[in-house]
């Protein structure tokens, strides 16, 4: 059973400039009859239609009570480092910038969270190889033509087709899929280069 499905837990938000973390009030805190609404990328991707409707009724952004700047949605599993740990806060900002936070359903935690910039580069590089493999698939793919070929494609290549744009018959839009993976590869390459620039120069 998902731990967070049994009780309402507040979402953690962080202000990297102030190096502080805050918990945002839930809808159930002010309107007990309402379901909890959870902000954050992970939840917004996986939310049910009913949950998404609740999210539309609650502001998506949260402002820091100290500086007034926008805070980052870090997830319920987030634990803030000490305020004076500048290096840890800098790393958290780096993680968040590439889409890594501490969102989960409460079952197994948020998954792999690289502890250093070097580990982050290694993690992103491994992720990039998967993106390149997907891009290569769409570059050399033979598009199905007949109905039988389309049905076989949906069954055999569901992992390549999952989450991509489809037409009214449920068929994948190949040009859109190619453009999607090209964009993901370019974005990840940019992130890797940016993190590498922040790595300390090795002593000679």
Image: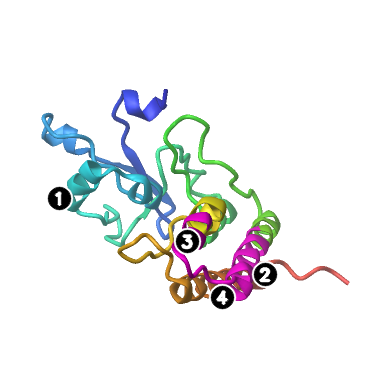
Q: Residues within 10 Å of mark 2 (few under 14, many from 20)?
A: some
Q: Which residue is tagged 2?
A: 196
Q: Which residues are magenta?
A: 127-152
**Rendered location of residue 10, percent (x, y):** 31, 36
Residue bearing the label numbered 3: 150
| Closer mark to the observer between disc 2 and disc 1 | 1
Question: Which residue is depicted at the point 46% across and 41% down?
Answer: 78
Q: CA distance from mark 1 to mark 4?
A: 34 Å
Q: Farthest residue in the right direction?
A: 204
Q: Is residue 95 or residue 174 the one in the foreground?
A: 174
Please state which of the two labelled residues, at mark 3 or mark 2, is closer to the viewer: 3
Horizontal relation, residue 163 to residue 149: left or right: left
Element carrying mark 4: helix
Where is residue 152 shown, x and y percent of the image?
52, 55
Query: Gap in Å between the C-alphas at discs 3 and 1?
Result: 39 Å
Q: Which label's residue is closer to the chain start, 2 or 1?
A: 1
How far, Cα to Cα, is label 3 from label 2? 42 Å
How many C-alpha atoms fall within 10 Å of the one at disc 1: few (<14), some, or many (≥20)? few
In what element is the residue under mark 1?
Answer: loop
Query: For residue 203, which quarter of the picture?
Result: bottom right
Q: Earlier in the sequence, mark 3 or mark 2?
A: 3
Q: Which residue is mark 1?
A: 57
Residue under the point 44% across and 43% down: 103
């Amino acid at each position: 059973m998902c731990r967070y499905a049994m009780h309402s837990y507040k979402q953690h938000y962080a202000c990297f400039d102030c190096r502080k973390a805050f918990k945002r009030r839930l809808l159930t805190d002010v309107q007990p009859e309402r379901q909890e609404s959870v902000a954050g990328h992970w939840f917004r991707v996986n939310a049910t239609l009913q949950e998404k409707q609740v999210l539309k009724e609650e502001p998506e952004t949260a402002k820091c009570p100290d500086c007034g700047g926008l805070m980052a949605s870090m997830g319920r599993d987030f634990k803030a480092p000490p305020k004076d740990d500048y290096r840890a806060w800098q790393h958290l900002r780096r993680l968040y910038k590439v889409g890594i936070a501490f969102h989960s359903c409460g079952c197994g935690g948020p998954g792999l969270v690289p502890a250093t910039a070097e580990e982050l580069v290694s993690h992103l590089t491994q992720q990039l190889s998967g993106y390149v493999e997907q891009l290569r698939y769409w570059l050399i793919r033979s598009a199905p033509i007949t109905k039988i070929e389309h049905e076989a494609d949906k069954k055999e290549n569901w992992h390549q087709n999952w989450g991509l744009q489809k037409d009214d018959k449920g068929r994948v839009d190949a040009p859109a899929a190619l453009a999607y993976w090209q964009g993901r590869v370019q974005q990840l390459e940019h992130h890797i280069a940016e993190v590498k620039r922040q790595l300390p120069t090795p002593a000679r």
